Amino acid sequence: MKLFYDFHIHSCLSPCGDEDSTPNNIVNMALIKGLNVIAVSDHNTGKNCPAVMAVGKKNGLVVLPAMELTTSEDIHILCLFETYEDLQKLEGHIQKTRLKIKNKPEVFGRQLIMNERDEVIGEEEHLLIVSSGISVEEVAALVKGFGGIPIPAHIDKQANGIIGILGAFDYHLGFEMIECSVDSGVTLPQITDSDAHYLWDIAEAEHFIEAETCSARGVFEALKKMCKNGE
């Protein structure tokens, strides 16, 4: 079946994300846009994933747990998972390596952790848009080791894109899929996402994947199959 997606959406936990991007608002906007599956991918954390996943489940929207990891070289890597438990393993590793710089909400924005009722239950103290302490040479193997799919994000952008930072795409780094909105010339399966920091930026029902079932398992297996077929 065709499942329309947007795998790169920031919540109010990302300092650059709008505070209106709450779990319920994200899910409702995705449904208004006609999407079947989304992923919440905040910078270097997945702490708002449980709330968005819970709201999605109540409303018939599949939500994959994810994060946008920042490598030591300032390259953004979209990390998709089937289960939140697997994402937690990656986040636990990052907690040991990530730079600890106290956030300045008046400069970078608040980093709000919410429950499924859109109530603030915490605030991330340290700035999330910093290096995870993980290099681009090790990130693919690391994410795969925790059960995830590592995808270089927005490679068509100069800022934080793998080509813009490194000057070229290195196939030996172990990536099997890319995120891009144009034909990049990289011969790997491609997904196209919004990288939404505001609710209105969430993608329309334009890009889709073919999956056996409309479920986290079905979506994740479809993505893994795309990676395998692209080898």
Image (tube, rainbow, N blue to C red):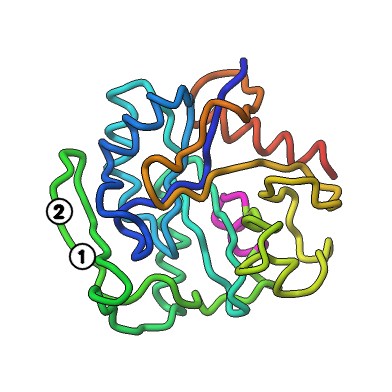
Closer to the camera, 55 or 24? 24
First to last magenta residue range: 140-149
Q: Which mark is on residue 113?
A: none
Question: Which image quarter is the C terminus in?
Answer: top right
Q: Which residue is mark 1?
A: 123
Q: Is residue 48 left or right of residue 115?
A: right
Q: Is residue 181 left or right of residue 98?
A: right
Report which quarter residue 219 is drawn in.
top right
Q: Is residue 144 covered in magenta? A: yes
Please give the name of the residue rendered at 58% of the width and 75% of the height, measured from the top-left corner.
74
Q: CA distance from mark 1 to mark 2?
A: 8 Å
Q: Which residue is mark 2?
A: 120
Q: Is residue 185 left or right of residue 103?
A: right
In this view, the residue farthest toward the top is: 1
111 versus 198 height, above or below: below
Secondary element at image label 2:
strand
Secondary element at image label 1:
strand
Please give the name of the residue rendered at 69% of the width and 49% of the height, measured from the top-left corner.
180
Number of other residues with Cα within 10 Å of mark 2, as a class: few under 14, some 14 to 19, many 20 or more: few
Q: What amino acid is found at the position of numbered circle 2 in the picture?
A: Val
Percent position (x, y) of residue 171?
Answer: 83, 61
Q: What amino acid is found at the position of numbered circle 1 in the picture?
A: Glu
59 versus 97 height, above or below: above
Report which quarter residue 227 is drawn in.
top right
Q: How many marks?
A: 2
Marks 1 & 2, CB-CB < 8 Å contact = yes
Closer to the camera, 148 or 160? 160
